[in-house]
Amino acid sequence: MTATDDHIDRLPAPALVRPTSQAERVADLLRTFVIDGELAPGVRLSEEKLSRKYQVSRNTLREAFRLLSRERLLVHRMHRGVFVAHPTGEDVRDLFNARRSLELPAVREAGQAPRALVDAVGQAVEEGEAAHAEGDWWRVGSANMHFHEALAALAQSARINEFMRQVLAETRLVFHVMAMPREFHAPYLSWNRRIHLALAAGDTEAAAEELARYLTISERQLTTAFAQMEGPEQA
Amino acid sequence: MTATDDHIDRLPAPALVRPTSQAERVADLLRTFVIDGELAPGVRLSEEKLSRKYQVSRNTLREAFRLLSRERLLVHRMHRGVFVAHPTGEDVRDLFNARRSLELPAVREAGQAPRALVDAVGQAVEEGEAAHAEGDWWRVGSANMHFHEALAALAQSARINEFMRQVLAETRLVFHVMAMPREFHAPYLSWNRRIHLALAAGDTEAAAEELARYLTISERQLTTAFAQMEGPEQA
DNA sequence: GATTGCAGTATTGTTCAACAATCCAACGAT
DNA sequence: ATCGTTGGATTGTTGAACAATACTGCAATC
């Protein structure tokens, strides 16, 4: 170890250059398509067409499919192909149960979390309000996701964070199943603001109760919409 | 719809015959190997050797690898191959934070859960005690996993259940990193028994407190062991 | 008229062989 | 000691081939 090594140790280390494989890149691409709704729920992804379009071999494409099917964004059906996941009313209930398990305790234990994590919640609130001011409804939705992601992050576990991202991505799929009206997200803006205010004030219990109400109402809205949808027509 | 269709509706439906792909079967196989410690943490899985040994093509094998790397049981390192995950002390902290987030709230809300789910917790306790009576330490460990899996299941979310399974599988890997003494699991048997008793009695808060203590102590044991291990020697 | 049986077709499941890209260890030069 | 080079081994990716399966439509049956 020479003296010059000290300089190296001081470098902003974590930005390590990670080489990525073709399969991962394709998976990233498809993931954004699914989350953004460019690939509608239930749509089948033809191996031949996709491999031709994105200039990758079928084998590489299939590796990407495996990654995304473990994330529940794609569904593999033997000899039939892979399809964009198509959540049902049952899935909605499950997703919200999962969110309750993740978000509520995270908020209740927010006292243990570093201030930076609480601030991130506030930033998401502001992002949503800014998007609302610009009338960018899609970004309002994204900001709402960031908000809840920030809530789960209070639990301080990278694994929880990743799981939460998955759950939220799936939740976003739910919105694609039935085109929600643009104004659907509007009421949540003030709600998020209230939750963050309570958090910043250290009143975690109040924040948790607000959040619980939010989740209950949001779930009810979606499940009733699904009931109307799955009842009359077929699955 | 003829009258005979009624009989079909009454069949034990959920046992649907799901055809499985080669890739999934290989993934299942490798998963058990990893969890059971037959493939030690850090070991590299040669594509050529494995494909030859299990008579599958490299491409199929790689599909299985992608599945398992999303489960964090394998780690893909570009141009180097896939390795059995090798958890660090940092991972241990993260895993236990995740478990606290999952298990504690699940126990606290156990009142909402159907009795069958609470009974499942008791069954896991008995499984552990039976295994202990037989001196089958490996099964004691498995039963302990089942116990905590049953706790998380009180949250009533299939997604939570799966996530918990993953977390526990990783936790099991931790035990393979350093061979824990056989008696390591012994004290947990009575602990699990106490937690279940409190649960069955409806005293969820007492159960949660016991569980919290358990997690704290268990985490401390593992992290100190890791500190001794990662400090002197290299990573 | 609805169900069953049977093409034919399209697509996925899987394998194989080849090549490019990269890592790694060993060697040798500075 | 450090660095550049070289060669071998392994992964990354491809394209083509074939088997296995699902789907459609039509004819045959009751």
Image (cartoon, coloured by chain):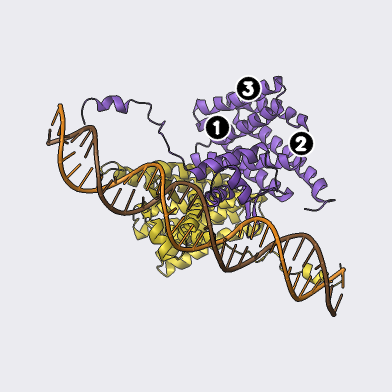
Chain colours: A yellow, B purple, C brown, D orange
x then y, percent, for residue B29: 58, 39
Residue A144 located left or right of residue C27: left
Q: Residue at x 43, y 38 (%)?
A: B19
Q: Which residue is drawn at 52% across and 57% down?
A: A147
In the rendered image, the vertical position of residue C28 relative to residue B5, given as above or below: below
- Type of amino acid under label 2: Met
Sooner in the amino-acid sequence: mark 3 or mark 2 = 3
Quadrant in which the N terminus of chain B appears: top left
Q: Nearer the viewer, mark 3 or mark 2?
A: 2
Residue B70, visible in the rendered structure? yes
x then y, percent, for residue A130: 47, 68
Q: Which of marks 3 and 1 is in front?
A: 3
Sooner in the amino-acid sequence: mark 2 or mark 1 = 1
Sooner in the amino-acid sequence: mark 3 or mark 1 = 1
Q: Which residue is drawn at 72% across and 39% down?
A: B175
**Residue picked out by circle 1:** B110
x then y, percent, for residue B204: 60, 31
Disc 2 to disc 1, C-alpha distance: 32 Å
**Residue picked out by circle 2:** B180
